[in-house]
């Protein structure tokens, strides 16, 4: 499976009093990875939304293995775990910049909806681009 990678650095505002990255930021970093994955497939989230296609998160899972600390560089690797006409599951690995043991692993599940929040089908153009990236 192909993964799209994006490099980031823990900002001060993302840490607690001990200088450790606060747990909810990992979900934000998953989103950064997800939007980067779409770009690597040749489209943006904004383009999907212009077409009236939305991918709301309906489930999220994150397993924390090691802490990230203020100013530490890390990488978010994002891949497709499952892709159906009305459903997408992205997998994530967050690792230190040196590629050591994963810091965190996770998954987000999304349904494909229209502007009104009704379930719809992901247009084949986008599905095919994602499949080609797998």
Image (cartoon, rainbow, N blue to C red):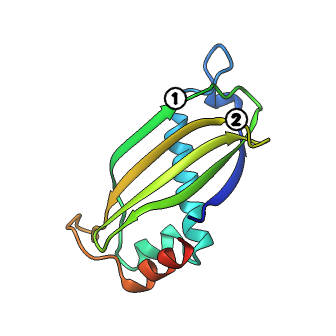
Residue appearing at x 36%, y 66% in the figure = 54
The disc, 1 or 2, on the residue closer to the chain's N-terminal end is 2
Q: Are marks 1 and 2 in contact (CB under 8 Å)?
A: no
Name the residue furthest bottom: 125
Q: Position of residue 117 (x, y in %)?
A: 23, 64
Q: In the rendered view, would you say 56 is above or below 122?
A: above
Closest to the observer, 50 or 34: 34
Regarding mark 2 in the picture, which secondary structure is present there?
loop
Residue that extends furthest to the left in the rendered view of this protein: 118
Looking at this view, name the residue that lies furthest to the top.
18
Q: Quadrant of residue 21?
A: top right
Residue 111: x and y, percent? 29, 62
Q: Residue at x 22, y 67 (%)?
A: 116
What residue does disc 1 label?
Answer: 23
Relative placement, left or right, of 87 versus 32 is left
Instruction: Indicate the position of residue 29 as horizontal and vertical percent values.
Output: 57, 45
Residue occupied by mark 2: 10
Say which of 51 and 83 sits in front.
Answer: 83
Give the percent coordinates (x, y) of residue 38.
Answer: 54, 68
């Amino acid at each position: 499976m192909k993964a799209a990678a994006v490099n980031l650095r823990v900002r001060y505002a993302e840490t607690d009093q001990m200088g450790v990255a606060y747990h909810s930021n990992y979900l934000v970093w998953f989103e950064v990875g997800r939007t980067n994955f779409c770009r690597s497939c040749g489209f943006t989230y904004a383009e999907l939304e212009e077409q009236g296609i939305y991918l709301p998160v309906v489930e999220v899972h994150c397993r924390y293995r090691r802490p990230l600390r203020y100013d530490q560089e890390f990488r978010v690797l994002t891949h497709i775990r499952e892709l159906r006409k009305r459903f997408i599951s992205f997998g994530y690995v967050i690792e230190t910049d040196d590629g050591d043991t994963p810091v965190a692993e996770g998954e987000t599940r999304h349904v494909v909806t229209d502007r009104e929040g009704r379930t719809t089908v992901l247009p084949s153009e986008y599905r095919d681009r994602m499949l080609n990236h797998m």
